[in-house]
Amino acid sequence: MNDSNDRILLSVKDAEKVYRMGMVDVHALRRASIDILEGEFLIIVGPSGSGKSTLLNLIGGMDRPTSGSVFFLGKDLARASDRELTLYRRNEVGFIFQFYNLIPTLTALENVQVAVELVRDHINPLEAIRMVGLENRADHFPSQLSGGEQQRVSIARALGSNPRLLLCDEPTGALDLQTSRQILGLLLKLNRDMKKTIVLITHNSAIAGIGRRIAHIRDGSLHSVHFNENPAPVEEISW
C-alpha cells in the first residue's frame, strides 16, 4: 500500500498489448497494473520475453496498449494524439538504453546538445556532462570512450531534457560488474539528489535489491510488487 503522501506520477491500469503474428495473437502484456510514485526508484525484473520492455515502451509513450490505460498526471497516454505523445517523450521522459544509442560522429557533448535542441526547459548540456563526471571527456567521440563512459554520456543525454521520469532499459546489460556498480550508483545519486523518478528494467535479479520498490513480471503479467525496506548498497551486489 502506498503512503497517503505519495504522489502518483504515472499509473498503468489493466494494460494489455497484443501483437498479430500471421494468424496468431501474441499477448506481450496481460492486464498489467502498477503505480509509479514521484521521486521513487522502481525496478522491474523479469526474464527475457516476460513483457518488461513492452511495459517500459507503454510507460515511455513509445507505444500504446491494445486495451487499458496509462495515465501520466491524470492524462491517458493511451488516448493521446501522436503530437501529444511526441511532446511527452521530448519533455517528460529520458531514455537510457543498454547499448547507449549514441551518434558516433558526434562528441559526447554534441550528443547531449542535439538531444535537447527542441526541449523547452533543458539543462545546459555541459552541466549535464559534468553531472555524470565526464567534463574532461566532453570533446571525445564514442569510439574513444569506454563502455561505462558511453553509458554516462547516455545518462547525460537523458538528463539534458530535465525530464520528470528516467526510463532505463537494461542499462548495465553490456557492462562488467565493476562498471555496472558505478552506473547504478550514479542512477541512485540522481534519484536521491535530483529527485528524479527512475524506472529500471532488468533480467538480472541481483540488481533488484538496490531498488526501493521491486516489481516482478513473468509471461506478460505483473506477479508481485513490494516495498524493499533495506535496499542493498551497490558495492554489495554481485553476479
Image (tube, grey):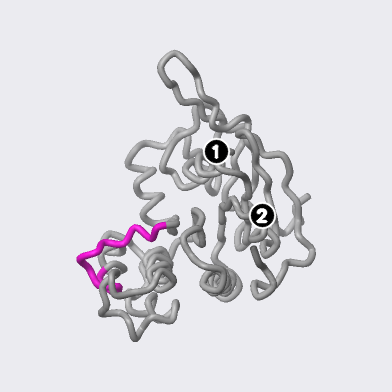
Is the residue under label 1 in contact with that under label 2 (CB below 8 Å)?
no
Q: Give the magenta range.
A: 99-110
* Amino acid bearing label 1: Gly
Q: Which residue is mark 2?
A: 205
Q: Which residue is mark 1?
A: 49
| Pointer 1 local density, CA inside 10 Å: few below 14, some 14–19, many at least 20 | some
User: Looking at this view, is 87 or 220 the one in front?
Assistant: 220
Q: Quadrant of the C terminus?
A: bottom right
Tell me residue 232's x, y (percent): 72, 69
Tell me residue 4's x, y (percent): 75, 55
* Residue 102 within the segment the image draws in magenta: yes
Residue at 57% over, 48% down: 10
Is residue 159 among what the camera can see? no
Residue at 44% over, 21% down: 20
| Pointer 2 local density, CA inside 10 Å: few below 14, some 14–19, many at least 20 | some
- Residue located farthest toward the top when viewing the structure as drawn: 23
- Depicted 86 relative to depicted 200: above or below: above
